[in-house]
Amino acid sequence: MEYNSLSTLVLVFLPFLLFITRKYYKGVKNLPPGPKPWPIIGNIHQIGHKPHASTAMFSKEYGPLISLRFGSKLIVVASSREAAMGILKTQDRLLSGRSIADSLHQSFMDFYFVWANDCSDHWKSLRTLTRVELFSTKAIEAQSNLRNEKLTQMLDYLDTMQGKVVKIEGVVFTTLFNTLSNLLFSKDFVDLKDEHGTSHAMKSALLKLFQNASTPCVSDFFPLLGGLDLQGLRKNSLTQLNKLSSFWEDIVKERRARIPSSSVNNEKDFLDRLLENEFTNTQIDILTLDLFSAGTDTVVTTIEWAMSELLRNKEIMNKLHEELKNEIGSTSIKKIDFSRMTYFNACIKETLRLHPVVPLLIPRRAIETCDVMSYTIPKDAQIWINVWAISRDPQIWEDPHTFKPERFILSNLDFRGHDYEFIPFGAGRRMCPGLPSGINSLQTILASLILRYDWVLPNNEDPSKIDMTEKFGTTLQKEKPLEIIFKHKE
């Protein structure tokens, strides 16, 4: 987020903005403490391009629950285990709304799943449907042949790329995207070689949607200006959605046409289930977009961070490889029970602790006024949970900035939403519904890459000098993508 770019728009609307911010600021008492806001812009100028880090610094000065002003918008930031518990558990129902970026305010926003404005009946039905058909233990077991097929295709491709520089994010993205596209539509949408540029086009459209959602927008800070779309973000987001939906619109059309003649014995994919439930084309498009965006970028980013840390920590990598080799032996990795691999799972947890994929979680919204830690959270306040700060709290974690998987070996801490010092996927009713599927993909892909290949940096660069600079967006990515040369283990 770079907030300085808003200065011109703010100046143009200066008199009007002064009026609405003065009106809004009056009458709200007992808010969490925080830095004094400037007139009109509030604290926008103090956030910078890494809001997870800047708000963590504010929490050290003002406490674990702070308030900020972005224009006329009130932001409440929780940066401790206790504050997170107060929001995600104690007041989960009253603070379970979503604060939706202005770029996502479209005519069809009532159909959102991940970005659903509140926990409506439609949201509940989508959560149940996706859990049963895609994310349950039974569903993931039924997907095993497909997942194994896509994993094999990825490894076969990497075999052909031995000795060449590979940008790992692109390979993993394509593998995950095709796994999802087959679960949804029984079709590959992209290919690893990307000879036709399809992979690049789809990834670019998704990334642009992410960028639009995380771009500082004057309408987010002054909602009364929302209808003007002054920065064109709504229009561009709709364009990107139309680009993406064009890849599956013919499939949906053809599938609808054959419904009357469909045999009950035919194997059905998720699209068939949506059509059985009388979903419109727009509803299918929006849910598909939600699933693709949530099911690819998070796993890709985590794998890239994990590989970077393992390259930088050779002893950890050797120990991890030894465990995988001993546990798997001659058994296919596709049949292995990862729950037995203590050190491997500790490495995954440590990656998620040190590099939480969504560092502020997806912003929540107060649907009613309530109290957290004796402070008032007014209705419609936007709420950030700074899991990045919580995961680096020295009062909870010894040597918090060091990659140290051993901290989880004798610990019962887990990321399934019950331990509020470790909530990379959130907690409560808005917790990530695709967690079981994402962890399954993360485990199988990462373990396969460790067992099958030696990893070498281009030009024999020193792994200890890998650039670990973060790039904030909808997810917390490496600013410099990881490039690796894969070589078969002897």
Image (cartoon, rainbow, N blue to C red):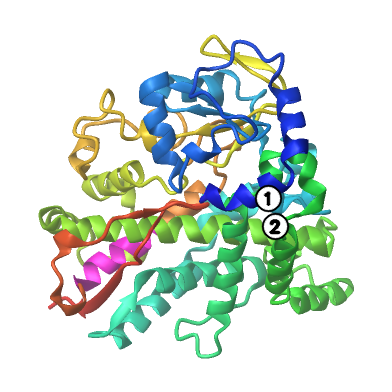
Secondary structure mainly formed by the magenta segment: helix
Residue 465 image-quadrant placement: bottom left
- Identify whether 272 is placed above or below 431: below
Query: Picture coordinates of residue 79 (x, y %)?
Result: 43, 28
Residue type pointed to by label 2: Gln
Helix, strand or loop at disc 2? Answer: loop
Inspect this view and state whether residue 325 appears: no
Residue extending farthest left: 315
Of circles 2 and 1, the one toward us is 1
Residue type pointed to by label 1: Leu
96 horizontally vs 299: left or right: right
For the point 19% across and 64% down, which residue is it? 329
Report if residue 12 lies within the magenta region.
no
Residue 23 image-quadrant placement: top right
- Identify whether 81 is placed above or below 347: above
**Where is mark 1, residue-wise?**
9
For the point 22% across and 73% down, which residue is it? 453
Going from N to C along the chain, the mark reached first, 2 or 1, is 1
Q: Nearer the viewer, residue 316 or 45?
A: 45
Tell me the distance, in whole angstroms, between the alpha carbons under discs 2 and 1: 9 Å
**Where is mark 2, residue-wise?**
231
For the point 50% across and 17% down, which residue is it? 33
Residue extending farthest right: 260
Query: Picture coordinates of residue 163 (x, y %)?
Result: 22, 85
The magenta stretch is 442-456
Inspect this view and state whether residue 402 appears: yes
Q: Decide: marks 2, 1 in contact (CB < 8 A)?
A: yes
